[in-house]
Image (cartoon, rainbow, N blue to C red):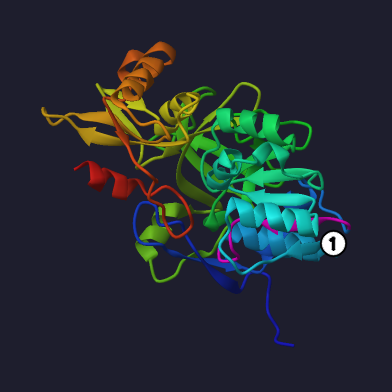
Amino acid sequence: PFDSHRDEPAIWLFSGGTTGPPKAVVQPHRSFVNTTERYGQGILGIRSDDVTIAVPKLFFGYATGSNVLFPFSVGASCVLFPERCTPDTLFSHIARHRPTILVNVPTMIQQMLAHADASSQDVSSLRLATSAGEALPPELHERWMRTFGVELLDGLGTAEMWHIFISNRPGDVVPGTLGRVVPGFDVTLCDAEDREVEDGEIGTLWVRGESRAIGYWLQMDDTNRAFRGEWYVSGDMLRRNADGTFTYCGRADDMLKVGGRWLSPAELENCLMTHAAVREVAVVGAQNADGLVKPCAFVVSPLPSPALAKELQELAKSRLEPYKYPREVIFVDVLPRTHLGKVDRARLAKMRR
């Protein structure tokens, strides 16, 4: 066998590319062992009689870990299928292979719930499901529990940290939050001057742990900005709550300055998702006639109409601070997505222009 060291490069894992071209993240061998032990075994409690199945394909690190490395580490089984994942495909494979762990993403969660026969599908083999890749609105979590009754663990991971490092736990789920820090990782939130913020304030995510990447391949400037000593400085904006859980507030590039105050797109999106006629929503900044940036909501709904747009604006006004309501509501058939299935906000902003 070829000799290798735990700190030597093992793979290039490409970042999501939501704010620019994807970057090749150089991950060492040690990252696989660390997240398998810390999250796969420590949080999910994966065991030899488990069968995993994943919505994302294996080029997504979330799936590579959860649907290959984790089960292989304990002698469990995984379901792999070549066809594009749709609700019908997924329900069929669940019925046939009887998996116990479903590796899911919010987009597919929404599509599964929108399926005409969702409530009659047999998912009784599942003992838990995970969600990552983008924000999971609490309304979507509640609908999932009402329909399927399978415990759903939302969490946050990045290509730069290989896998999930903040997560809800079995038996300890707080809907609308990412849960708590996975043991073995350290997380802090900082302001623009790199000073730690207080609980309840929004800050930039700093995280360290054994699965931190070496850097970006042939992108030294980006590497120096993001990798500082033992820490990886993410572009994600989070809020730490009093109970130790974290709430996702969006990417730093997505945050909007409206009337001199910050607006988290995720907060407005979660609010609009509570309306029964909304299937998906994404909020971006758009300039008005005076050149000022205001929130614009792109909405997927089976019942698009001016009346619904007005209802959504009034809903936001009633539940959030007045300046946060969407000045425009634009109905679309689908939200554009990146190669990893995340909402492509840059394309939405261009569509608005």
Residue 243 in the magenta stretch? The answer is no
Front in this rendered view, residue 107 or 22: 107
Image point 71% across, 58% down: which residue? 93
Residue 159, image x, y percentages? 53, 57
From the viewer's perspective, is residue 8 above or below residue 256? below
From the viewer's perspective, is residue 120 above or below residue 268? below
Residue 147, image x, y percentages? 68, 33
The number of callouts visible is: 1
Please give left or right for residue 273 compared with residue 97 in the image. left
The residue range painted magenta reads 49-59
From the viewer's perspective, is residue 216 above or below residue 123? below
**Amino acid type indicated by mark 1:** Val
Quadrant location, the C terminus: top left
Residue bearing the label numbered 1: 74
Does residue 261 appear in the picture of this structure?
yes
**Residue 312 quadrant:** top left
**Mark 1 surroundings: few (<14), some (14-19) or many (≥20) residues within 10 A:** some
Residue 52 in the magenta stretch? The answer is yes
Image point 44% across, 37% down: which residue? 250
**Residue 35 quadrant:** bottom right
Image point 51% across, 51% down: which residue? 232
From the viewer's perspective, is residue 348 above or below residue 68? above
